[in-house]
Image: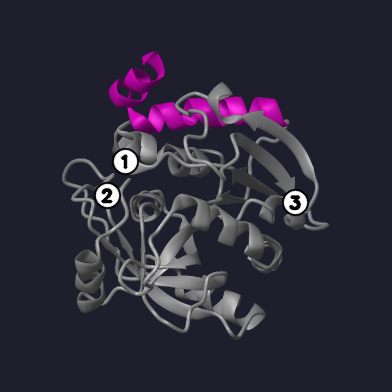
Amino acid sequence: MAEEQCVDTQDPFVLAEQAAAVIAEGTGVARHDIALVLGSGWGQTADLIGETRASLPHDAVPGFAKAAVAGHSGTMRSVAIGDSDRRALVFGTRTHFYEGRGVRAVVHAVRTAAAAGCRAIVLTNGCGGLRAEWAPGTPVLISDHLNLTGQSPIEGANFVDLTDLYSPRLRELAQQIDPDLDEGVYVQFRGPHYETPAEVRMARVLGGDLVGMSTTLEAIAARQCGMEVLGVSLVTNAAAGISPNPLSHAEVVEAGQAAAARCGKLLARIVVAI
């Protein structure tokens, strides 16, 4: 409870600076270059980017908490990017909006990454697909989003432009690495319950291609901090009403594990090229 109060009452950017200082001390690196937030199905990515040089439990860093979702890791890592001198700051879990810790906690990792020096961030997730051609295990670039949480991480009269929130440059780079990568509009619902078939139909009418419970608030916060954003979804299941089968988190985890090696290799190649 004290930790949650800390996130709610402190200036969020001051807290991010404090977290970045702890990360710098714990990893022995003053600055990191790229951050990754690994959602369901993306856990092997850090191993494929390069050598892990240091790791810290999430809950040992100010403002962070233990992983609350099965299939996520409770460790953040400082990873060498290929053979270069660059470092990736890899978050093995995220705080979801439905956990009730507040929007500041949801975007704390993003603000910490910016404070740690990261110029770009890769946001990944496991999601429901609205297109029949996207079988479970299909990675999809996020081209835009619909934020249906009713919330924003930006406080006060700070009017941030989101026109090209999901970097066209980074999406083009990703498609050069894998020309088969599709793009789609990601729709974030509040969760933690899955969407109803009617809500999925609504999302499709509004222009959505993917549905999930994360990412959009983080992306907005990253833009506010001046970072380039690459969003990548892993379709772990057909959304409600698309498939006749009931939805379950076990299905999400299973699909993520089945696609982990392929998606991890893809994302590692993208990160090395950024």
User: What residue sits right under mark 2 in the picture?
Assistant: 190
Query: Rounded to the nearest whole Å, what is the CA distance between mark 3 and mark 2?
Result: 31 Å
Nearer to us in this view, 125 or 219: 125
Q: Secondary structure at mark 2?
A: loop
Q: Residues within 10 Å of mark 2 (few under 14, many from 20)?
A: some
Provide the residue span drawn in magenta. 1-27
Quadrant that contains the N terminus: top left
Query: Rounded to the nearest whole Å, what is the CA distance between mark 1 and mark 2?
Result: 6 Å
Q: Estimate the x, y position of residue 141 in percent, counting from the top left.
A: 48, 72
The answer to whether mark 1 and mark 2 are in CB contact below 8 A is: yes
- The relative height of residue 18 versus residue 68 in the rendered view (above or below) is above
Q: Nearer the viewer, mark 3 or mark 1?
A: 1
Q: Nearer the viewer, mark 3 or mark 2?
A: 2
User: What residue sits right under mark 3 in the picture?
Assistant: 47
The answer to whether mark 3 and mark 1 are in CB contact below 8 A is: no
User: What residue sits right under mark 1 in the picture?
Assistant: 98
